[in-house]
Each structure stands twice: as structure tokens, then as C-alpha cells.
Amino acid sequence: MSDAAAGNPAPPPPSPWERERPARPQPTAQRTPLSRERIVEAAFRVLDRQGLDGLSMRQVAAELGVTVSALYAYVSSKDDLLELMYTRLFDGFTMPEPDPGRWSEQVRDYARAGRERLRSHRDVARISMAHVPFTAELLPHVEGLLAIFRTAGLPDRIAAEAGDLISTFIDGFVLEEGMWQDRAAARPDGGDSSLARPDWREMAGEMQNYFASLPQADFPHLRALADVMVSDSSDERFEIGLEIILRGLASYLPDKAPDA
């Protein structure tokens, strides 16, 4: 049933004048205002795609569709941008209240979170190694880690060095992971970037055979440890390295059994 039959008159056809009129222009989407947050997000996209060596203010500006000069209203330099990127990684992360009875587990949690933080974007470990974490935003994290060490009873000299030791271990470990993943990505077959060392499996047999061929009298330990020196598990290697550090720190606790 037509609208006319139902008592509702049908709309008239378009008039010739309306047909000749140009189409009404569609409103253009309003550009999202530039901000530090948008610049940092764009910088991470560039970083993930091109790595730290390919990250530049020009590339970030191109990612946002703005001029390079527009960025400098929000960041003073590339170093300033890198600091903002590094600080952004700590968003939502808080240090726990120190618990002397659980100090080693608290440090484990801190180290695991730190590793995942650095693995969240390409080459962030390189940014971390060049960054001094004594900014207003990051000082509470440094303070919280030192509080865990001192509350546990570590001597002040050891507590002062322990935070840097843990951070250096995390940075170096993730840096190595990233280097092997980049190496796999550069291979013609793409490699397997999920492995601790993506081409380790094919190297493992060769290494074990080589160690086994060494003279027993000259290299007894290399021969004995060949199997356990080769591991596909990055997680396992990280946990063992962390355990070694924690047991060493525990040895400095006065008159306490190692809590590790």
C-alpha cells in the first residue's frame, strides 16, 4: 500500500532546480588537537615499525600529518620525547608496600614487570639504558624499590647498588632478546621470533656436537655443561639469572636465612 493510499501524500519528485544544485558539501571531520599524548603514541608506532635508529621528529610529524615545527610546541627535543616515552611505560604501575617477609618475591614481581614493560615496544631497552630514572614521575618507583631492600635488612651500601644491578640485568636481558628477534625478522624466511634466540635450535645441535668434540682433558666443563648451556626458553633464562642475583643479595642479610 502506498503512502498516498494510506492517506499520506507521497513526497513530490525533486524539482529541476534541485537537480541542478551542487551536492551539499559533507562536513569535514574536525582534526584531533595535537597533544603530548598523541605525539608519544605516534612515536611508539614509529618505534615499533622502524626501530630506535629510524625514530626521528620528522617521522613522528609525518605519522601525525603535521609539520615538524608543530611538535616543538609540546616537546623540546628528541631526547625530551624519548623521556616522555619511557615515562609513559610506567603508567598504571605502582610499587607495593615493603614486606620484609616477602622481599625477594616483591623484587621478582618488580623485575618481571620491568621485563614485560621493556618488551612492550621495540628497542625500549635501548631507551631505558640511556635514561636516568631520577625524574619527578619515576622517583617514587626508585624510592619504592630501595624501601624494599632496606626494609628487608640489606646494608645501605648493598641496597644502594642493588636497584641499579637489577635494572641493568633487565635492560641487558631484554636488549639481547630484541637483537635476536630483529635478527630473525631480517632472515628471508622470517625466523621464529617467539624463541629466546630465534635461530638457536638450528645452532644448538652444532654447538653441542662441537663441545662434545673438544678434548676432555682440556675442556671438561664445556663438555659437561653443553646440554644445559643451550636453552630455547627466554623465561627460564631470565628466572635463573634473577634467582642468582636474589640469592647473592640474601647473603648480605644479617643473621637471616636466605629469603630467595
Image (cartoon, rainbow, N blue to C red):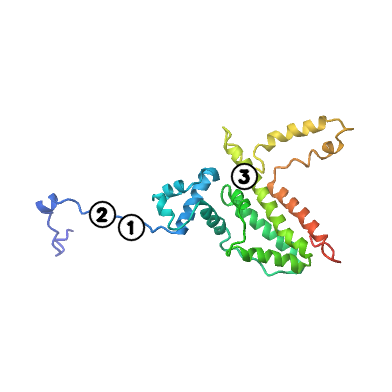
| Residue 87: quarter of image | bottom right
Q: Pinpoint residue 107: horizontal percent, then vertical percent.
A: 71, 61
Considering depth in this image, is 6 or 42 the residue closer to the camera? 42
Q: Tag 2, which secondary structure?
A: loop
The residue wearing badge 2 is 26
- Amino acid type of the residue tagged 2 in the rendering: Gln
Q: Dot 1, crowdedness within 10 Å: few (<14), some or many (≥20)?
A: few
Asked if disc 3 and disc 1 are in contact, CB closer than 8 Å, the reply is: no
Q: CA distance from mark 2 to mark 1?
A: 12 Å
| Residue at horizontal 79 percent and vertical 38 percent from the top | 226
Q: Is 129 displayed left or right of 21 in the figure?
A: right
Instruction: Tell me if mark 3 has few (under 14), some (14-19) or many (20+) residues whose alpha carbon lies within 10 angstroms of its own.
Output: many
Q: Which mark is residue 257?
A: none
Give the x, y percent position of residue 238: 71, 50
Q: Of discs 2 and 1, which sits in the foreground?
A: 1
Q: Position of residue 75 (x, y in %)?
A: 47, 56
In the image, residue 140 sits, relative to residue 23, either above or below, namely: below
Name the amino acid, label 3.
Gly
Q: Which residue is mark 3?
A: 178
**Labels 3 and 1: the sequence-earlier one:** 1
Residue highlighted by disc 1: 30
In the shown orientation, is residue 181 left or right of residue 232? left
How far across and down, in percent of the image, does residue 32 sit? Answer: 38, 58
In the depicted view, which residue is nearer to us: 216 or 133? 133
User: Which secondary structure lies at badge 1?
Assistant: loop
* Identity, as a three-letter code, of the amino acid under mark 1: Gln
Question: At 77% from the left edge and 67% from the top edge, which residue is drawn?
Answer: 152
Which residue is located at x 69 percent, y 49 percent?
235
Q: CA distance from mark 2 to mark 3?
A: 47 Å
**Considering the image in quadrants, where does the N terminus appear?**
bottom left
